Amino acid sequence: MKNLRIIAFTHKNLDLKEIGKLVLAPEEKQQILTSLKEELNIGELFYIGTCNRVELVFTLESDVNDYILNKIINHLTVNKFDNIDVIRNAASVYQDEAALIHLMRVSSSLDSLVVGEKEILAQVRRSFDECHDWKLTGDFLRLCMNRVVKTAKEIYTDTKISEKPISVVSIAYRLLKNSAINDDTRFLFIGAGETNQLFAKYLKKQKLNNFVVFNRTLEKAQLLANELEGKALPLSDLSNYKDGFDVIITCTSAKDPIITPEIYAGLLNGEKGKKIILDLAIPNDTAPEVIENNPVHFINIESIQETIKRNMDERYGELCHAEHIIELNLNEFRPLVRQRKIELAMQVVPQTIKEIRNTAVNSVFAEDINELDQQSKDILEKVLNYMEKKYISIPMLMAKDILIKE
Protein backbone atom coordinates (compact mmCIF):
# COMPACT_ATOMS: atom_id res chain seq x y z
CA MET A 1 0.00 0.00 0.00
CA LYS A 2 3.03 2.23 -0.37
CA ASN A 3 2.27 5.67 -1.87
CA LEU A 4 -1.43 5.62 -0.86
CA ARG A 5 -2.36 8.96 0.74
CA ILE A 6 -5.55 10.41 2.25
CA ILE A 7 -6.18 13.94 3.50
CA ALA A 8 -9.44 14.07 5.47
CA PHE A 9 -11.57 16.85 6.93
CA THR A 10 -14.30 15.33 9.10
CA HIS A 11 -16.87 16.04 11.78
CA LYS A 12 -14.29 14.98 14.39
CA ASN A 13 -12.10 18.04 13.84
CA LEU A 14 -14.23 20.57 12.00
CA ASP A 15 -17.66 22.14 12.32
CA LEU A 16 -20.17 20.77 9.79
CA LYS A 17 -20.78 24.26 8.43
CA GLU A 18 -17.06 24.62 7.70
CA ILE A 19 -16.96 21.19 6.05
CA GLY A 20 -19.78 22.34 3.78
CA LYS A 21 -17.52 25.07 2.43
CA LEU A 22 -14.96 22.44 1.39
CA VAL A 23 -17.47 20.49 -0.71
CA LEU A 24 -16.77 21.11 -4.39
CA ALA A 25 -19.68 22.16 -6.57
CA PRO A 26 -20.57 19.60 -9.28
CA GLU A 27 -19.77 21.99 -12.12
CA GLU A 28 -16.25 22.77 -10.83
CA LYS A 29 -15.22 19.40 -9.41
CA GLN A 30 -13.64 17.81 -12.50
CA GLN A 31 -11.63 20.90 -13.41
CA ILE A 32 -10.28 21.42 -9.87
CA LEU A 33 -9.33 17.76 -9.36
CA THR A 34 -7.69 17.49 -12.78
CA SER A 35 -5.70 20.66 -12.14
CA LEU A 36 -4.63 19.39 -8.71
CA LYS A 37 -3.54 16.04 -10.13
CA GLU A 38 -1.39 17.68 -12.81
CA GLU A 39 0.10 20.36 -10.58
CA LEU A 40 1.25 17.96 -7.83
CA ASN A 41 2.15 15.11 -10.20
CA ILE A 42 -0.36 12.84 -8.46
CA GLY A 43 -0.63 9.33 -9.88
CA GLU A 44 -4.31 8.61 -9.18
CA LEU A 45 -6.97 10.33 -7.11
CA PHE A 46 -10.62 10.46 -6.16
CA TYR A 47 -12.57 12.85 -3.99
CA ILE A 48 -15.25 12.16 -1.36
CA GLY A 49 -17.60 14.99 -0.36
CA THR A 50 -20.53 14.45 2.05
CA CYS A 51 -22.31 16.54 4.68
CA ASN A 52 -19.85 15.51 7.40
CA ARG A 53 -16.59 14.73 5.58
CA VAL A 54 -14.43 15.83 2.67
CA GLU A 55 -11.54 13.50 1.77
CA LEU A 56 -8.99 13.31 -1.01
CA VAL A 57 -7.68 9.79 -1.73
CA PHE A 58 -4.61 9.74 -3.96
CA THR A 59 -1.26 8.14 -4.77
CA LEU A 60 1.99 10.04 -4.42
CA GLU A 61 5.61 8.86 -4.27
CA SER A 62 6.59 11.46 -1.64
CA ASP A 63 5.09 11.88 1.83
CA VAL A 64 2.49 14.58 2.42
CA ASN A 65 4.39 17.69 3.55
CA ASP A 66 3.27 21.25 4.32
CA TYR A 67 3.67 22.33 0.69
CA ILE A 68 1.41 19.54 -0.63
CA LEU A 69 -1.13 20.05 2.16
CA ASN A 70 -1.32 23.78 1.47
CA LYS A 71 -1.72 23.22 -2.27
CA ILE A 72 -4.57 20.75 -1.75
CA ILE A 73 -6.32 23.02 0.75
CA ASN A 74 -6.02 25.99 -1.63
CA HIS A 75 -7.59 23.97 -4.45
CA LEU A 76 -10.45 22.73 -2.25
CA THR A 77 -11.23 26.00 -0.50
CA VAL A 78 -10.95 28.34 -3.52
CA ASN A 79 -10.97 31.48 -1.34
CA LYS A 80 -13.93 30.39 0.84
CA PHE A 81 -12.06 30.95 4.14
CA ASP A 82 -10.46 34.01 5.67
CA ASN A 83 -8.26 31.92 7.94
CA ILE A 84 -6.73 28.89 6.20
CA ASP A 85 -4.90 27.89 9.39
CA VAL A 86 -8.18 26.61 10.87
CA ILE A 87 -8.61 24.22 7.95
CA ARG A 88 -4.96 23.19 7.92
CA ASN A 89 -5.05 22.33 11.62
CA ALA A 90 -8.22 20.27 11.13
CA ALA A 91 -6.69 18.08 8.40
CA SER A 92 -6.02 14.42 9.18
CA VAL A 93 -3.32 12.78 7.05
CA TYR A 94 -3.15 9.02 6.47
CA GLN A 95 -0.33 7.33 4.54
CA ASP A 96 0.43 3.86 3.16
CA GLU A 97 -1.34 1.00 4.96
CA ALA A 98 -2.91 3.37 7.50
CA ALA A 99 -4.63 5.13 4.58
CA LEU A 100 -6.24 1.90 3.37
CA ILE A 101 -7.39 1.02 6.89
CA HIS A 102 -8.95 4.49 7.17
CA LEU A 103 -10.77 4.07 3.85
CA MET A 104 -12.09 0.68 4.99
CA ARG A 105 -13.31 2.19 8.28
CA VAL A 106 -14.97 5.11 6.48
CA SER A 107 -16.76 2.88 3.96
CA SER A 108 -17.89 0.55 6.76
CA SER A 109 -19.30 3.54 8.72
CA LEU A 110 -16.97 2.90 11.67
CA ASP A 111 -15.71 6.46 11.29
CA SER A 112 -19.14 7.99 10.62
CA LEU A 113 -21.10 10.49 12.66
CA VAL A 114 -23.68 7.69 12.97
CA VAL A 115 -21.99 4.30 13.24
CA GLY A 116 -23.73 1.68 11.10
CA GLU A 117 -25.29 3.96 8.47
CA LYS A 118 -24.94 2.21 5.11
CA GLU A 119 -25.27 5.26 2.86
CA ILE A 120 -21.57 6.12 3.23
CA LEU A 121 -20.53 3.03 1.24
CA ALA A 122 -22.74 4.10 -1.68
CA GLN A 123 -21.33 7.64 -1.44
CA VAL A 124 -17.72 6.41 -1.55
CA ARG A 125 -18.46 4.14 -4.52
CA ARG A 126 -20.19 6.96 -6.42
CA SER A 127 -17.23 9.25 -5.71
CA PHE A 128 -14.76 6.71 -7.04
CA ASP A 129 -16.85 5.91 -10.14
CA GLU A 130 -17.17 9.61 -10.94
CA CYS A 131 -13.40 10.18 -10.81
CA HIS A 132 -12.85 6.93 -12.74
CA ASP A 133 -15.09 8.27 -15.51
CA TRP A 134 -12.89 11.40 -15.58
CA LYS A 135 -9.81 9.13 -15.92
CA LEU A 136 -8.37 10.37 -12.63
CA THR A 137 -8.03 6.87 -11.16
CA GLY A 138 -6.03 3.86 -12.31
CA ASP A 139 -5.27 0.22 -11.58
CA PHE A 140 -4.03 0.61 -8.00
CA LEU A 141 -7.01 2.57 -6.65
CA ARG A 142 -9.32 0.18 -8.53
CA LEU A 143 -7.67 -2.70 -6.66
CA CYS A 144 -7.98 -0.83 -3.35
CA MET A 145 -11.64 0.01 -3.90
CA ASN A 146 -12.52 -3.59 -4.73
CA ARG A 147 -11.09 -4.66 -1.38
CA VAL A 148 -12.70 -1.73 0.46
CA VAL A 149 -16.16 -2.60 -0.91
CA LYS A 150 -15.66 -6.29 -0.06
CA THR A 151 -14.66 -5.39 3.51
CA ALA A 152 -17.59 -3.04 4.03
CA LYS A 153 -20.12 -5.55 2.71
CA GLU A 154 -18.74 -8.22 5.05
CA ILE A 155 -19.01 -5.89 8.02
CA TYR A 156 -22.61 -4.93 7.21
CA THR A 157 -23.51 -8.59 6.59
CA ASP A 158 -21.54 -10.43 9.29
CA THR A 159 -22.00 -8.00 12.19
CA LYS A 160 -25.03 -6.33 13.78
CA ILE A 161 -23.55 -2.88 13.31
CA SER A 162 -26.45 -1.63 11.17
CA GLU A 163 -29.16 -3.98 12.41
CA LYS A 164 -30.93 -1.81 14.98
CA PRO A 165 -32.34 1.53 13.77
CA ILE A 166 -31.06 4.69 15.46
CA SER A 167 -32.91 7.49 13.66
CA VAL A 168 -35.89 9.06 15.41
CA VAL A 169 -38.19 8.58 12.41
CA SER A 170 -37.29 4.94 11.72
CA ILE A 171 -37.72 3.94 15.38
CA ALA A 172 -40.96 5.91 15.67
CA TYR A 173 -42.27 4.14 12.58
CA ARG A 174 -41.40 0.70 13.98
CA LEU A 175 -43.14 1.52 17.24
CA LEU A 176 -46.19 2.69 15.34
CA LYS A 177 -46.15 -0.33 13.04
CA ASN A 178 -46.24 -2.60 16.09
CA SER A 179 -49.47 -0.91 17.20
CA ALA A 180 -51.72 -2.76 14.75
CA ILE A 181 -52.27 -0.09 12.09
CA ASN A 182 -54.12 -1.29 8.99
CA ASP A 183 -55.72 -0.10 5.75
CA ASP A 184 -58.60 1.50 7.65
CA THR A 185 -56.42 3.48 10.07
CA ARG A 186 -57.18 7.21 10.01
CA PHE A 187 -54.10 9.45 10.29
CA LEU A 188 -53.93 13.09 11.31
CA PHE A 189 -50.62 14.85 10.57
CA ILE A 190 -50.05 18.05 12.53
CA GLY A 191 -47.17 19.94 10.97
CA ALA A 192 -45.64 19.48 7.53
CA GLY A 193 -41.96 19.98 8.32
CA GLU A 194 -38.99 17.75 7.52
CA THR A 195 -39.67 15.18 10.27
CA ASN A 196 -43.26 14.59 9.23
CA GLN A 197 -42.20 14.51 5.58
CA LEU A 198 -39.72 11.72 6.35
CA PHE A 199 -42.33 9.86 8.35
CA ALA A 200 -44.81 10.17 5.52
CA LYS A 201 -42.40 8.32 3.20
CA TYR A 202 -42.46 5.30 5.53
CA LEU A 203 -46.26 5.27 5.61
CA LYS A 204 -46.57 5.75 1.87
CA LYS A 205 -44.66 2.50 1.30
CA GLN A 206 -47.43 0.69 3.21
CA LYS A 207 -49.99 1.95 0.67
CA LEU A 208 -52.18 3.49 3.37
CA ASN A 209 -54.63 6.10 2.12
CA ASN A 210 -56.52 7.88 4.92
CA PHE A 211 -54.53 11.04 5.68
CA VAL A 212 -55.37 14.57 6.74
CA VAL A 213 -52.55 17.14 7.08
CA PHE A 214 -52.84 20.26 9.25
CA ASN A 215 -50.27 23.04 9.04
CA ARG A 216 -50.06 26.76 9.75
CA THR A 217 -49.20 27.35 6.09
CA LEU A 218 -51.84 25.67 3.96
CA GLU A 219 -49.57 25.53 0.89
CA LYS A 220 -47.04 23.42 2.78
CA ALA A 221 -49.80 21.18 4.12
CA GLN A 222 -51.00 20.70 0.56
CA LEU A 223 -47.56 19.56 -0.63
CA LEU A 224 -47.41 16.82 2.02
CA ALA A 225 -51.06 15.89 1.46
CA ASN A 226 -50.41 15.53 -2.27
CA GLU A 227 -47.57 13.12 -1.56
CA LEU A 228 -49.85 11.07 0.72
CA GLU A 229 -52.88 11.47 -1.57
CA GLY A 230 -54.69 12.94 1.40
CA LYS A 231 -56.45 16.15 2.44
CA ALA A 232 -54.84 19.44 3.53
CA LEU A 233 -56.31 21.85 6.09
CA PRO A 234 -54.99 24.95 7.88
CA LEU A 235 -54.00 24.40 11.52
CA SER A 236 -56.72 26.81 12.58
CA ASP A 237 -59.31 24.20 11.46
CA LEU A 238 -58.03 21.61 13.97
CA SER A 239 -60.51 22.68 16.63
CA ASN A 240 -63.42 22.15 14.22
CA TYR A 241 -62.37 18.79 12.78
CA LYS A 242 -65.05 16.13 13.45
CA ASP A 243 -64.23 13.28 11.04
CA GLY A 244 -62.43 11.15 13.62
CA PHE A 245 -58.93 9.65 13.79
CA ASP A 246 -56.96 6.65 15.00
CA VAL A 247 -53.42 8.04 14.95
CA ILE A 248 -52.09 11.55 15.43
CA ILE A 249 -48.54 12.25 14.18
CA THR A 250 -47.44 15.66 15.35
CA CYS A 251 -44.23 17.64 15.08
CA THR A 252 -44.31 21.42 15.14
CA SER A 253 -42.10 24.18 16.54
CA ALA A 254 -44.85 25.50 18.82
CA LYS A 255 -43.76 26.54 22.32
CA ASP A 256 -47.12 25.62 23.88
CA PRO A 257 -49.19 22.42 23.45
CA ILE A 258 -51.31 22.30 20.31
CA ILE A 259 -53.32 19.24 21.35
CA THR A 260 -55.02 20.61 24.44
CA PRO A 261 -57.76 18.71 26.37
CA GLU A 262 -60.40 20.79 24.59
CA ILE A 263 -58.90 20.22 21.11
CA TYR A 264 -58.51 16.50 21.80
CA ALA A 265 -62.10 16.15 23.01
CA GLY A 266 -63.29 17.80 19.80
CA LEU A 267 -61.14 15.48 17.66
CA LEU A 268 -62.56 12.44 19.47
CA ASN A 269 -66.08 13.65 18.74
CA GLY A 270 -67.52 11.05 21.10
CA GLU A 271 -65.31 8.08 20.09
CA LYS A 272 -64.22 5.97 23.08
CA GLY A 273 -61.54 3.61 21.72
CA LYS A 274 -57.83 3.83 22.51
CA LYS A 275 -55.94 6.19 20.23
CA ILE A 276 -52.27 6.57 19.30
CA ILE A 277 -50.38 9.85 19.55
CA LEU A 278 -46.90 9.98 18.05
CA ASP A 279 -45.44 13.27 19.30
CA LEU A 280 -42.00 14.06 17.83
CA ALA A 281 -41.97 17.72 18.86
CA ILE A 282 -39.64 19.32 21.42
CA PRO A 283 -41.35 20.46 23.62
CA ASN A 284 -44.27 18.06 23.14
CA ASP A 285 -47.26 19.26 21.14
CA THR A 286 -49.51 17.21 23.44
CA ALA A 287 -50.70 18.58 26.79
CA PRO A 288 -49.95 16.21 29.74
CA GLU A 289 -53.66 16.21 30.73
CA VAL A 290 -54.58 14.60 27.39
CA ILE A 291 -52.37 11.59 28.17
CA GLU A 292 -53.42 11.39 31.81
CA ASN A 293 -57.19 11.53 31.22
CA ASN A 294 -57.63 9.50 28.03
CA PRO A 295 -56.88 5.95 26.82
CA VAL A 296 -53.85 6.90 24.71
CA HIS A 297 -50.82 4.97 23.51
CA PHE A 298 -48.34 7.87 23.68
CA ILE A 299 -44.97 7.76 21.88
CA ASN A 300 -42.65 10.75 22.28
CA ILE A 301 -39.03 11.74 21.74
CA GLU A 302 -37.98 10.72 25.26
CA SER A 303 -39.12 7.11 24.83
CA ILE A 304 -37.52 7.00 21.37
CA GLN A 305 -34.22 8.36 22.72
CA GLU A 306 -34.06 5.46 25.18
CA THR A 307 -34.37 3.03 22.27
CA ILE A 308 -31.74 4.93 20.30
CA LYS A 309 -29.29 4.68 23.21
CA ARG A 310 -29.82 0.91 23.55
CA ASN A 311 -29.40 0.41 19.81
CA MET A 312 -26.29 2.59 19.67
CA ASP A 313 -24.74 0.61 22.54
CA GLU A 314 -25.35 -2.59 20.54
CA ARG A 315 -23.77 -1.08 17.43
CA TYR A 316 -20.67 0.02 19.31
CA GLY A 317 -20.46 -3.46 20.79
CA GLU A 318 -19.91 -4.76 17.23
CA LEU A 319 -16.85 -2.57 16.60
CA CYS A 320 -14.33 -5.23 17.69
CA HIS A 321 -15.87 -7.73 15.26
CA ALA A 322 -15.76 -5.14 12.48
CA GLU A 323 -12.11 -4.26 13.16
CA HIS A 324 -11.26 -7.98 13.01
CA ILE A 325 -12.87 -8.21 9.55
CA ILE A 326 -10.74 -5.26 8.43
CA GLU A 327 -7.60 -6.97 9.72
CA LEU A 328 -8.43 -10.21 7.87
CA ASN A 329 -9.03 -8.36 4.61
CA LEU A 330 -5.83 -6.40 5.05
CA ASN A 331 -3.84 -9.61 5.48
CA GLU A 332 -5.45 -11.05 2.33
CA PHE A 333 -4.83 -7.86 0.37
CA ARG A 334 -1.10 -7.45 1.00
CA PRO A 335 0.03 -10.38 -1.23
CA LEU A 336 -2.55 -9.40 -3.87
CA VAL A 337 -0.96 -5.97 -4.18
CA ARG A 338 2.52 -7.48 -4.53
CA GLN A 339 1.22 -9.99 -7.08
CA ARG A 340 -0.42 -7.23 -9.09
CA LYS A 341 2.84 -5.25 -9.12
CA ILE A 342 4.64 -8.31 -10.49
CA GLU A 343 1.93 -8.83 -13.13
CA LEU A 344 2.23 -5.23 -14.28
CA ALA A 345 6.02 -5.41 -14.29
CA MET A 346 5.94 -8.65 -16.31
CA GLN A 347 3.48 -7.34 -18.89
CA VAL A 348 6.40 -6.52 -21.22
CA VAL A 349 7.73 -10.11 -21.20
CA PRO A 350 5.35 -11.67 -23.81
CA GLN A 351 5.78 -8.80 -26.27
CA THR A 352 9.57 -8.75 -25.81
CA ILE A 353 9.85 -12.49 -26.46
CA LYS A 354 7.66 -12.19 -29.57
CA GLU A 355 9.90 -9.39 -30.86
CA ILE A 356 13.04 -11.54 -30.26
CA ARG A 357 11.41 -14.43 -32.13
CA ASN A 358 10.39 -12.23 -35.06
CA THR A 359 13.89 -10.76 -35.30
CA ALA A 360 15.44 -14.24 -35.28
CA VAL A 361 13.05 -15.67 -37.91
CA ASN A 362 12.77 -12.67 -40.22
CA SER A 363 16.26 -11.22 -39.95
CA VAL A 364 19.07 -13.09 -38.16
CA PHE A 365 18.27 -16.60 -39.47
CA ALA A 366 16.02 -15.68 -42.39
CA GLU A 367 18.31 -17.06 -45.11
CA ASP A 368 18.95 -20.34 -43.26
CA ILE A 369 15.24 -20.89 -42.66
CA ASN A 370 14.41 -20.24 -46.31
CA GLU A 371 16.71 -23.08 -47.32
CA LEU A 372 14.76 -25.58 -45.21
CA ASP A 373 12.08 -27.80 -46.73
CA GLN A 374 8.47 -27.32 -45.63
CA GLN A 375 8.51 -30.22 -43.13
CA SER A 376 11.58 -28.78 -41.40
CA LYS A 377 9.98 -25.35 -41.32
CA ASP A 378 6.86 -26.80 -39.68
CA ILE A 379 8.96 -28.58 -37.03
CA LEU A 380 10.92 -25.38 -36.37
CA GLU A 381 7.63 -23.45 -35.99
CA LYS A 382 6.44 -25.97 -33.40
CA VAL A 383 9.73 -25.73 -31.50
CA LEU A 384 9.63 -21.92 -31.49
CA ASN A 385 5.99 -21.87 -30.33
CA TYR A 386 6.85 -24.24 -27.49
CA MET A 387 9.90 -22.20 -26.48
CA GLU A 388 7.91 -18.94 -26.64
CA LYS A 389 5.20 -20.23 -24.29
CA LYS A 390 7.78 -21.54 -21.83
CA TYR A 391 9.80 -18.34 -21.84
CA ILE A 392 6.61 -16.39 -21.12
CA SER A 393 5.24 -18.64 -18.37
CA ILE A 394 8.43 -19.54 -16.50
CA PRO A 395 9.34 -15.97 -15.37
CA MET A 396 5.71 -15.48 -14.23
CA LEU A 397 5.77 -18.69 -12.19
CA MET A 398 9.16 -17.88 -10.69
CA ALA A 399 8.03 -14.40 -9.67
CA LYS A 400 4.85 -15.74 -8.03
CA ASP A 401 6.89 -18.44 -6.28
CA ILE A 402 9.18 -15.79 -4.83
CA LEU A 403 6.11 -13.82 -3.73
CA ILE A 404 4.60 -16.82 -1.95
CA LYS A 405 7.88 -17.57 -0.16
CA GLU A 406 8.08 -13.97 1.03
Image (cartoon, rainbow, N blue to C red):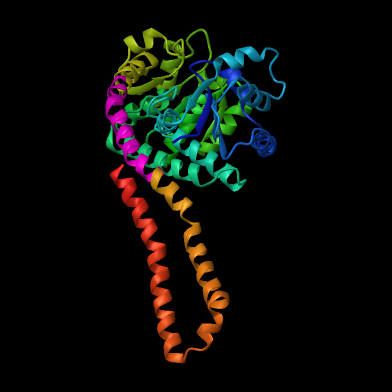
Q: Nearer the viewer, residue 221 or 395?
A: 395
Q: Main secondary structure of the magenta part?
A: helix
Q: Where does the C terminus fall, quadrant-wise?
A: top left
Residue 279 in sight from this viewpoint: yes
Q: Position of residue 386 (x, y in %)?
A: 38, 73
Magenta highlight on residue 323 = yes
From which residue to which does the magenta span run?
Answer: 313-337
Q: Position of residue 308 (x, y in %)?
A: 34, 20
Q: Identify whether 140 is placed above or below 57.
A: below
Q: Nearer the viewer, residue 325 or 314?
A: 325
Question: In percent of the image, x 67 and y 27: which residue is there?
Answer: 75
Q: Where does the N terminus fall, quadrant-wise?
A: top left
Question: In percent of the image, x 40 and y 84: which residue is there?
Answer: 379
Question: In percent of the image, x 50 and y 36: which residue is there?
Answer: 123
Q: Nearer the viewer, residue 346 or 210?
A: 346
Q: Position of residue 7 (x, y in %)?
A: 54, 26
| For residue 174, side relative to residue 10 (left or right) | left
Quarter of the figure with residue 81: top right
Magenta highlight on residue 345 = no
Q: Nearer the viewer, residue 135 or 133?
A: 135
How many numbered discs sit on the rendered protein?
0
Quarter of the figure with residue 206: top left
Q: Position of residue 74 (x, y in %)?
A: 68, 24
